[in-house]
Image (tube, helix red, strand yellow):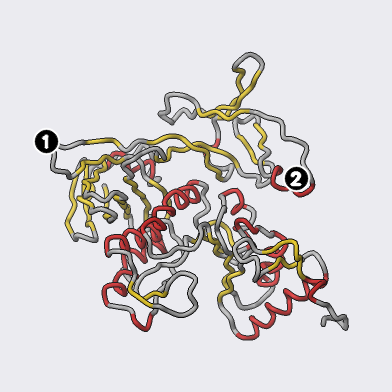
């Protein structure tokens, strides 16, 4: 009841819109009607009266995107004197473009499906984390502060089985190297850190990992977080000699603010008689061929499809930028790891400008131990120290092995299968 009027369930829900992952449990709320708004308001007024600090709103993001409900709840929280952290879920089929429409309304939003203690689940997060970082969504404007792409919980320690309400319980199936890899990626990508195990039964090693001061510093205070591609590998296998390879990369679209200098470089050109395409070629990029997209007419859409198609309309501006008509953000082109690569070696970089630190993480997604190397000459551009600045020397520590690093050229680590290395460097 609100303002003397009684609302019924049939006035509130939308039976035709069941939650994709729990069709028998959740249905959408009609946040456009007085009934739906009254229902939502009553729930969140109750939560606020209880002193709740964190709310995760499920079945409104990814495959179940519902901007009306997200907007209404965000406006309610924004009107409270005491802040409540507002999180969205689930993240299946979430994209950077979709996140652009909600990031300013919330504090965190899931960008993957549920994460459990399987190595394959960790692997699935690398490309997702890369794409959201490339779109400058880490630490974007959010509800009463900033917003963060959420890679889901850390399945460490004492766990139950997926989808089980209670038991059976067992220790995580992830190895210690795999847990270090996951914690390092989550922190380099600045994901919210949520422990998924039983804190009453946490062991000393796991507690030390999730409270590691270097990792928490990176997660809290670092900036310019992104995938780093200028690495080489030396496979540690018993064959004649060693196989040194440069990690292959390709080019991919990314979305960013139109104030970013990298967005300029788009132009239209004719090809194949009367057909036209739009190509990106940056004067500072070393790609051999321009990256091109092809013009096409959108088909006549039904009202249900029109909102989806509006997100895919782009306009080429006279200043060489390609602007999305829905989000107002611009397209650029960046290097990404070649998805066809059968020897997946990944790396991330971040900085702490106040402390003058550069963080570099190596990830070995193979089963075999591999030596991974990088050159300090490649760090200034990606760490935004200024492309004209030449680093003369870097010194620091690799935190897992505690080895000391001091180099004028390259630095390396022998990384175990499914493991990681994390360097904290000071450079001159």
* Of marks 1 and 2, the one in the foreground: 1
**The quadrant where residue 118 appears:** bottom left
Q: Are marks 1 and 2 in contact (CB under 8 Å)?
A: no
- On screen, residue 328 versus residue 152, left or right, reads right
In this figure, which residue is indicated by the disc labeled 1?
Answer: 240
Q: Nearer the viewer, residue 14 or 78?
A: 14
Residue drawn at point x = 51 percent, y = 57 percent: 112
| Mark 1 or mark 2: whose residue is earlier in sequence | 1
Residue to which mark 2 is pinned: 306
Disc 2 secondary structure class: helix
Q: Position of residue 234 (x, y in %)?
A: 21, 41
What's the distance in space between the residues labelled 1 and 2, CA to CA? Answer: 60 Å
Tell me the SS state at disc 1. loop
Q: Position of residue 410 (x, y in %)?
A: 22, 42
Give above or below for 286 relative to 24: above
- Residue at x-position 77% and y-position 41%: 301
Within the image, what quadrant is residue 22 found in? bottom right
- Vertical placement of residue 423 versus 204, above or below: above
Q: Which quarter of the picture shows residue 10?
A: bottom right
Which mark, by number, is residue 402?
Answer: none
> Residue at (49%, 78%) from the top-left corner?
165
């Amino acid at each position: 009841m609100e303002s003397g009027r009684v609302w019924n369930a049939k006035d509130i829900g939308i039976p035709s819109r069941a939650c994709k992952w729990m069709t028998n449990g959740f249905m959408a709320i009609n946040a456009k009607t007085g009934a739906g708004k009254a229902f939502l308001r009553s729930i969140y007024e109750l939560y606020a009266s209880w002193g709740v600090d964190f709310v995760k709103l499920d079945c409104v993001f990814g495959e179940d995107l519902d901007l009306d409900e997200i907007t209404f709840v965000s406006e309610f929280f924004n009107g409270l004197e005491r802040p409540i952290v507002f999180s969205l879920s689930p993240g299946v089929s979430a994209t950077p473009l979709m996140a652009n429409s909600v990031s300013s309304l919330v504090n965190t939003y899931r960008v993957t499906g549920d994460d459990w203690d399987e190595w394959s689940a960790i692997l699935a997060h690398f490309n997702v984390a890369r794409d959201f970082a490339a779109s400058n969504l880490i630490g974007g404007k959010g509800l009463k502060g900033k917003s963060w792409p959420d890679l889901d919980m850390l399945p460490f320690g004492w766990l139950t089985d997926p989808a089980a309400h209670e038991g059976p319980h067992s220790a995580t199936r992830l190895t210690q190297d795999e847990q270090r890899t996951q914690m390092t990626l989550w922190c380099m990508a600045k994901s919210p850190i949520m422990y998924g195990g039983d804190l009453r039964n946490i062991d000393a090693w796991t507690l030390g990992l999730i409270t590691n001061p270097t990792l928490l510093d990176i997660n809290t205070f670092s900036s310019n977080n992104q995938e780093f591609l200028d690495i080489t590998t030396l496979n540690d296998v018993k064959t004649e000699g060693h196989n040194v390879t440069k990690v292959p990369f390709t080019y991919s679209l990314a979305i960013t603010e139109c104030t970013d200098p990298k967005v300029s470089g788009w132009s239209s050109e004719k090809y194949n008689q009367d057909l036209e395409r739009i190509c990106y070629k940056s004067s500072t990029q070393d790609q051999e061929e321009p990256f091109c997209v092809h013009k096409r007419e959108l088909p006549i859409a039904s009202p249900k499809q029109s909102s989806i198609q509006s997100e895919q309309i782009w306009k080429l501006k006279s200043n060489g930028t390609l602007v999305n008509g829905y989000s107002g953000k611009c397209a650029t082109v960046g290097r990404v790891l070649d998805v066809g690569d059968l020897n997946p070696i990944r790396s991330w970089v971040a900085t702490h400008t106040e402390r003058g630190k550069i963080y570099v993480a190596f990830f070995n997604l193979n089963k075999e131990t591999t030596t991974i190397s990088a050159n300090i000459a490649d760090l200034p551009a990606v760490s935004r120290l200024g492309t004209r600045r030449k680093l003369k020397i870097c010194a620091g520590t690799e935190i897992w092995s505690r080895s000391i690093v001091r180099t004028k050229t390259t630095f390396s680590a022998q990384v175990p299968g499914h493991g990681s290395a994390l360097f904290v460097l000071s450079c001159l």
